[in-house]
Image: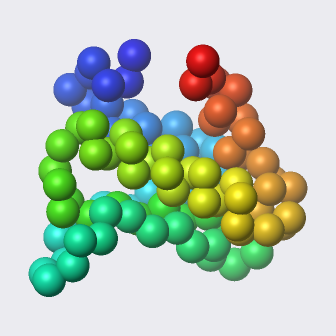
Amino acid sequence: MLSAAADGPARVADELAKAGIALVALEHLPRTFLDGATICRGEDTPVIAFTLHQDRIDNFGFTLLHELAHSILHLGPSALRASPLVRILRIYPIS
């Protein structure tokens, strides 16, 4: 269980990297309430960025799943064709 491990977020980053998804952590951006964002680098490399706006494990998990959902829904067919997101969801089912 990743959330029970002290290095859970690092393990998540490693698993995402294996699946072709970049995970980037940023310092809190002053005067913003931004927790995360998703972009596509090139044609099919999703990049999930999150800030330390709320440096808590529950916020990390929520933001990660929220941004993964954006990747699935909005990045388009080339990102989904590579489908590392589907592999991640099969490894860590939500049910």
Residue 31 location, x and y as percent? 14, 83
Residue 75 location, x and y as percent? 71, 68
Colour scheme = rainbow
Residue positioned 70% across, 26% down in the render: 90
Q: Is residue 69 above or below residue 9?
A: below
Residue positioned 37% across, 24% down in the render: 2
| Residue 35 in view in this figure | yes
Residue positioned 17% across, 70% down in the render: 28
Corner quadrant of residue 70: bottom right
Q: Is residue 82 above or below residue 9?
A: below
| Residue 17 in view in this figure | no
Residue positioned 78% across, 48% down in the render: 83
Left or right of residue 31: residue 93: right
| Residue lying furthest bottom | 31
Residue 3 location, x and y as percent? 32, 25
Left or right of residue 56: residue 68: right
Which of the two residues, 83 or 11, is positioned nearer the viewer here? 83
Q: Quadrant of the C terminus?
A: top right
Which of the two residues, 10 or 69, is positioned nearer the viewer here? 69
Q: Quadrant of the N terminus?
A: top left
Corner quadrant of residue 34: bottom left
Q: Is residue 42 above or below residue 69?
A: below
What is the total number of numbered labels drawn onto the structure image?
Answer: 0
Residue 49 location, x and y as percent? 41, 65
Which of the two residues, 36 or 11, is positioned nearer the viewer here? 36
